[in-house]
Image: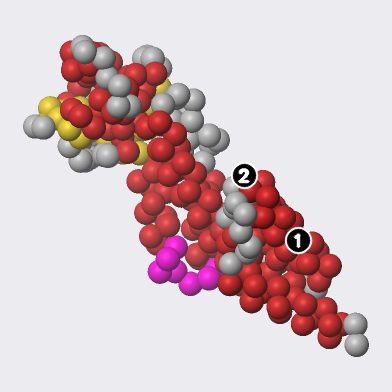
Amino acid sequence: MTATVRVSLLGPLEVTVAGHPMTAIGGPGRRALLTALSLGLGTTLSVPELLEAIWDDRPPMTATTKLQGHICALRQTLAGFGAADALQTKPPGYVLCRHRVTTDLVRHDELIRRARDAGLPERAELLRTALSMWRGASACADLRSAWAAGVTHALDERRWRVMEDLAEADLALGDPAAAIDAMESLVRQAPYRERAWEHLMAAHLERGDIAAALAVHDRLSRTLASGLGVAPGHRIAHLIDTVRSRSATAHR
């Protein structure tokens, strides 16, 4: 029976084969290569795509030779676990085979797809499970390249969307406290995400804390004005009208 290679991308890059950790992945270039192949699991990545993952748009003259060296070394490491065939040559490049390799990102995205079609209690549970799979900064976070920065941002966006979706589900389930905790964390990480601020305002409003909802709007307005020179969008404008209407009613 062939062993499955498991690549963890939702946190520092980790690889296990049949439960045994593959610690000898190599330096930044080899880790960038493995990350790129894992993100494109089952898809052939061309040599130029892999060169960009390792060297951005500044590959050395010997880049193709160095890439072949990285591929060879990675295969040798996999071979030590009986999984050399997990990485295959397929013109115009290389591919990690789905029948031998899986990633936590695949499982994560499957949970998200199921959550979209699920009813409220199950949706919240699926989203919570997906969010729990994150182990910290994603696989590329410590690599210093434009390619890695782009991948890190894309993975962060995935996580932030799950946080927002879960906050929305928690609000619908009558748990504004959970939404407040999560969205306060998110607006610190990504201060220009208006959907997170919207959920934060809505959660305070749900609790009947009009002053807190107004304070959140003030924080958002200052953040957007100072950082981007813009005002909150129409959804926030509509919500703050509701908050102010509630405030006026409460003071009659």
Residue at coordinates 44% horizontally, 24% vertically from top-left? 143
Which is more foreground, mark 1 or mark 2?
A: 1
Q: Amino acid at mark 2?
A: Gln
Disc 1 residue crowd, few under 14, some 14–19, many 20+, Cα 10 Å = few
65 displayed left or right of 196: left
Residue at coordinates 90% horizontally, 87% vertically from top-left? 252
How does the figure colour the protein chain or chains? Answer: secondary structure
In front: 134, or 122? 134
First along the sequence among labels 1 and 2: 2
Q: Is residue 230 above or below residue 83?
A: below
Q: Is residue 119 magenta?
A: yes
Q: Is residue 60 magenta?
A: no
Q: Is residue 196 above or below residue 90?
A: below
Residue 226 can be seen in this image:
yes
In what element is the residue under mark 2?
helix
Mark identifier at residue 189: 2
Magenta residues, as a range?
Answer: 115-121
Q: Which residue is mark 1?
A: 218
In front: 10, or 128? 10
Residue at coordinates 18% horizontally, 28% vertically from top-left? 47
Q: Amino acid at mark 1?
A: Asp
Instruction: Name the magenta segment's main secondary structure.
Output: helix
Distance in Å between CA atoms under marks 1 and 2? 18 Å
In what element is the residue under mark 1?
helix
Residue 164, position as x, y percentages in the image: 56, 58
